[in-house]
Image (cartoon, coloured by chain):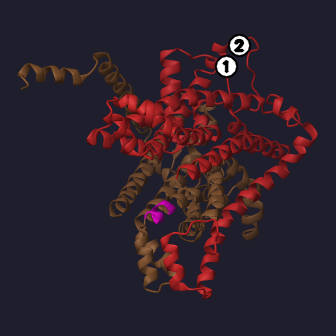
Chain colours: A brown, B red
Amino acid sequence: MATVDDQRDISIDLTGDVRRRRRESLVKATFFAAAAVSILISVAIVIALIGKAWAFVSSIELSQLWADGWFPRRGRFQLAALIVHTLMVTGIAMVVAVPFGLGSAVYLSEYARSGVRRVLKPTLEILAGIPSVVLGFFALQFITPNIVRGMFPGAQSANFLAAGIAVGILTIPLVASVSEDAMRAVPSSLREASYGLGAKRWHTALRVVFPAAISGIIAAVILGISRAIGETMVVALAAGLNGIMTFNPTEGGLTMTGAIANLAVGSDQVAGDVAAFQSLFFVGLVLFIFTLALNILSGRMVRRYRQRY
Amino acid sequence: MTTGTAAITTTELVRRSIEGRRFSPVNALIAFTLLFTLLSSVVILVTLLVDTIAAALPVFATRGFSFITSSLSPRAEAAGIWQGIMGSLALTGFVIAVAFPLGVAAAVYLEEYAPDNRLTRFLNANIRNLAGVPSIVYGILGLFLFVEVFMRGMLGASEGIAGRNVVAGGLTLAVLVLPIMIITTSEALRAVPSGLREASLAVGATRWETIRHHVLPVAVPAILTGSVLTIARAFGESAPLLLAGAQLSLFFTVASDSSFYDLMLTQPYTALPIIVFNFARQPQAEFVALTAASIVVLLVMLLSVNAAAVLARDRYERRYR
């Protein structure tokens, strides 16, 4: 018969060595601190952007935001011009990235044998690993003279079409890999049922698997848009420096990221508390809000297909 | 079996037995179109490489390796990229020293320790969102936090390069890749079968002992591959460095008697991708070949590391799946 005292002894034995337990909680606390650093980073980003953007907005007259064109050193801060140019580059990029990215994803997920996959998938990964500044040079030296001027001989040397195509090329691997993941998550019972009803392979791929994975595919496209909006080096090199709003894709102009890069490049001349330099933080804040909203939206879509299957 | 080596899934068997061997033109056309979209990426990649190498050849033919070992110069025929290579390696050192341990530790917490509560979900969502923040915004963060607050505010570096040193740049890149590092490491840890953990805990190991002796050893190849790819990304990154202080001029010098401390804190630096950007925006035609040559060096360094990591991972996947 066990007495009360015996039971207490056993329980003390099971809790183990004090030093071991102390080390355990120390390790856990260290790892938690590392994870908490990410919150500090977010807070620092928000403070940097909002603090300086507020200083900028309060130092200028709001009518300057609707002045003609984006010319920081002349006190003209037409944000709408930057946004129009950004959306134009992004739109062109999506015309490239969506068909090529999704087509690649359908092929890799539904058609490719494992051997073909093993060869072609790394190619996409290598393309994803090419630095964006290299694509910027490619846009200037190859896409503009050979492709854009082939279609529009009068195109400016820096133009939205070339920049958009290059940004699209950069976005293809992202769109392809996220949407491929979504299609591979579709259970094979759906495919088998489709074949069982006599459907062909293309019918199964495009009319069964593709619609079943649609929320993940939309997430991929939204992520691509977000990536294209935030892409900097391509537009800094290949989209030009014009601050006047234009809707012509064969001309060039500043995008949001292009304007930030341009201010940074010339920062020796305008550094300090002048409004011209602080406008960089304001544009950065707008860019941050755009991309954050798109990323949150895309995260929601991904969670939807993860829940379903 | 017609395909020999490749394993055939049940789905594929079902499809074949029902569809038979009849040729369908629609099927073939659509398969061809899809393959075309995929092969286009290969064509783009090859075009980019061939075009760049062709443009770079004259530089290597006339200058040889002196192009790599010379310093920057406004004269195209004398300009070299040594400072950029050194700067990029120093920046990468910071990324490895800061982002790798922090990223692995954070991922271990999130995957192995964190309870499923609101704080954990918030941490995870926050890291996912940070991974989607454009790199130029990290440049703004670096300019504010590392250059202005740390270097000028706390260390009083207001003269010379005014705090726009390689430490600020390195920390900026480290912060940029930290969320990606956490996400890839988390995926690697998630792939470790939970039976391993349960077995270790069941014989009385603590959580940390389980992680150190059983989880991490299994996950290490995947963690290293992911980390190498992530660090390579930092190596090619240039947008944040425009703001965080890399030198954008065609010429700068470092005082010849600089100590290590000076090189880190008071001397200017630049990075290889920044040199590419800088050469690419020069109007003179001679700089086109120079840009292409710098790109070739950048890509050789980057792609060799990338390819090694991808190949190592494929081999590892084949062995353990």
Quadrant housing residue B224: top right
Instruction: Provide the major secondary structure of the magenta segment.
Output: helix
Mark 2 element type: loop
* Discs 2 and 1 carry the same chain letter: yes
Where's residue B74, x and y in %? Answer: 81, 33
Q: Is residue B253 visible?
A: yes
Q: Dot 1, crowdedness within 10 Å: few (<14), some or many (≥20)?
A: many
Q: Which residues are magenta?
A: A180-185
Residue type at numbered disc 2: Ser
Q: Nearer the viewer, residue A83 or A106?
A: A106
Q: Residue furthest front?
A: A1
Give me the disc on residue B267: 1
Residue A173: percent from left, percent from top: 58, 57
The residue positioned 55% from the left and 65% from the top of the image is: A105
Q: Nearer the viewer, residue B152 or B221?
A: B221
Dot 1 falls on a residue whose secondary structure is: loop
Q: Amino acid at mark 1?
A: Gln
Q: Residue at x 47, y 64 (%)?
A: A184
